[in-house]
Image: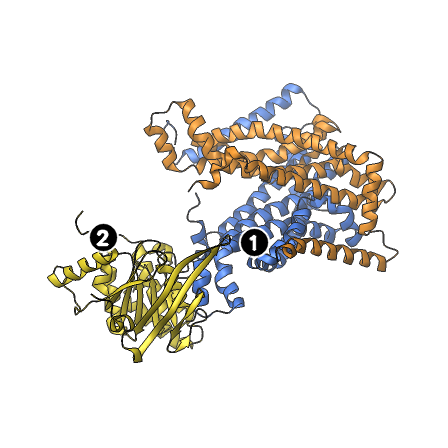
Chain colours: A blue, B yellow, C orange
Amino acid sequence: MNSLGQPRAWERFFWPVVAAALLLAFWHYSVVWTATKVFPSPLSVEKGIAELAAKHVLWADIGDSLRRVAIGFGLAVVIGIPFGLWLGWSPAANQTVNPVIQLLRPISPIAWIPVAIIFFGVGDHAAIFLIFLGSLFPILVACVSGVSSVPPIFRNAGRNFGLSTPQLLARVVFPAALPQILIGARIALGIAWLVVVAAEMIAVDSGLGYLVIDSRNSGKRYDLVVAAMLIIGVIGLALDFCIRRLERIESVRWGFRNAS
Amino acid sequence: MLLTEASVLGTKSAAKLRAEHLGMVYDRDGESLPVLEDINLDVDDGEFVCLVGPSGCGKSTLLNAMAGFLSPTSGSVRIDGEVVTGPDPRRILVFQDRGVFPWLTVEGNIGFGLSKLSRAERTQRIAHYVKTVRLEGFENSYPSDLSGGMKQRLQVARALAVNPDILFLDEPFGALDSITRVIMRGELLRIWQTERRTIFFVTHDIDEAVQLADRVVVLSSRPAQIKDVLTIDMAHPRNISSNRYLELRDELLKQIGLAYEI
Amino acid sequence: MKLFERLRPLLLVAVLLVIWEIAIDLHPGNILPGPIAVAGGILDLLQHGLLLKYVVASLFRVTWGFALAVFIAIPLGLALGWYRRGEMAFNPLVQIFRPISPLAWIPIAILWFGVGDLAAIFLIFVGCFFPLLLTAMNAVHNIPADYINAGRNFGLSQRAFVSRILYPAVIPQLLVGLRVTLGVAWLVVVAAEMISVNSGLGFLIVDARNAGNRYDLVVAGMVIIGFIGLLLDLGMQSFERMKSFRWINSEG
């Protein structure tokens, strides 16, 4: 797409490595030149990662964060998809419920923390509730959008073959809307990961978010702070990668053919 | 060909599909838009009838009304004497484009309407229709791997698999290139001659109508009325270079109001 | 029928409010406020002039953080989307930074900017930067090849190409991305204010709870946050519909 010609295969690895190397160099030298006593250098972050891994705390924290995401996200999927399908199917229901959704959606899950703590106390359940809240809305939106973009031809064909409405929803509308729903699920998973870290910084005392804030509070260990941040980034990326693989399943792949 | 009672109404006693005083008026922003006006039509069992007319005249509307997807504002449609009130597996509509379900394989699509059968019956029937439309080897392929013509064959197979009384086809070959179209016409005729269903076929292609139909119904432009019904008295296979063919074709062109010299 | 349709959502809201109020009244010892108490809380804030002050503070931070992100991320993203090698180089890095919650940047933000407005603005900037970058990159990818070829066919200069082909072609996607990211910015500002500043709607929530368990103010704060967030979203939507962008919906 530019005048320098098509990139070659090896360049896919070459350029990111160059960029990463430049970034690391820049980071390292800014730490050295500013002679900061607090901000960590790449090397100390690396050591920090090793330290965390050795201490076993890291794996427990990762486990906790992932567990909360799994439950909160899972709940959002199990509740959100049927509810979203219904809203998408019934314009009357959608028109009635949508304003409530639009009012609740802009309220950051973090703002729900005081209320969540009242209901669930400080701990896992509060975090899971927040994750559920954050993941629910993208899934609802995607379901409604997916259902309404199912071509009428499919509905007509389904009815032609004598399907009742529940059968139509299950055998035609849901599969047809699935690609869109998957996109919503991917967004929801990304949000879930953001929310869990934030929730752990405020309302619980384990997990990767807690690790970030604790490393700073108890000893200004910024090397561990940055180490934790990087780990958060990598795991978040891995989660995204996993859900992307779902898009390759044959019975959904057709919906993504036109994507790059 | 003159408009006679006989050619319009076929033979009264054996009418499989009958439209009586069928009318369709759309209400758009308070203004009423008549699309179909006083359509009277009979189709016999096992007949192949084509519907032609200028673009936008209401062919698809008529088709959808007959298949039960639209309720007529006046008049009625009867199939085997029963009034049509909605879609039914006994009369399947084949769409022009994108009718197959992309999330199911060829087998999945063909078997779509067969959930009430036993497993063995299902497998058998699916295999039979895969063969009928010549899609062997593609049983586990998804529609995105098939060409346009193959997808239409798949739709026909899916429709036939449920043993419908009537097959409605809405310009099924319209989205295909002209070479594929010719091939598909042959395929459809072959299937029709073996399976012998009643077929009601909408097209804007005059040659197609003359090549395929026993009778051709010509629709005027909006509000559509039946302008004429042509009986094609040629046996299959039809020689499309013969004088009779050209005569019929010219007659049809004239009815639609087109000159035959460009 | 039409009037009933319009009233239906309001009816739902009314029903929910009634259920909420009844549920609270049935549990007198509960700290959670009912809708009436919340309404009282909102009035309270209005009277003390705090409502306006906090809303302005939050909006101020959002505006700055969002604007900074827009003016840096979008041109950068467009450039990266255009030059494949640039994207190859930076995409992995972006993919790693994107899933890091802006709040996880708080210790760094406080280290660099201290506690205050700048830290909050930085957090909003971080939260908006990566999504906007990706939106811009994707928008460039999705320009139909036909447009590009047409531009080449007519021998446009680099500058003309950017202003007459690139820019109009990416605007629709950019606008959607801007709207979504504005929503993100609003979520982040509230969260950021709960931790690192002394004013704003997020601060209101923590403060109301810490200094006296005023849960009526807490929930009042939540309601206002939802309401303003909704207004922001609707505002962006009508911006998208403005005349000069009308063609977007009409194109094939």
The image quadrant where one finds the N terminus of chain A is: top left
> Is C244 above or below relative to A255?
above
Q: Residues within 10 Å of mark 1 (few under 14, many from 20)?
A: many
Which residue is located at x 70 percent, y 49 percent?
Answer: A130
Disc 2 to disc 1, C-alpha distance: 47 Å
Q: Amino acid at mark 1?
A: Val
Position of residue A112 in the picture relative to residue B25 (left or right): right
Q: Can you give x and y, in whole percent of width and height, for residue B61 in the image?
A: 39, 60
Q: Amino acid at mark 2?
A: Leu
Q: Nearer the viewer, residue B66 or A24?
A: B66
> Is A44 above or below relative to C229?
above
Q: Residues within 10 Å of mark 2 (few under 14, many from 20)?
A: few
| Residue C48 in view of the camera | yes
- Disc 2 secondary structure class: loop
Quadrant in the rendering for residue A195: top right
Provide the residue designation for mark 1.
Answer: A144
Quadrant in the rendering for residue A217: top right
Position of residue C173 in the picture relative to residue B14 (left or right): right
Q: Can you give x and y, in whole percent of width and height, for residue B27 in the image?
A: 48, 57
Q: Can you give x and y, in whole percent of width and height, for residue C219 in the image?
A: 78, 46
Quadrant in the rendering for residue B131: bottom left
> Is C135 above or below relative to B141?
above
- Disc 1 secondary structure class: helix
> Is B99 above or below relative to A102?
below
Position of residue C17 in the picture relative to residue B121 (left or right): right
| Residue A221 in view of the camera | no
Provide the residue designation for mark 2.
Answer: B258
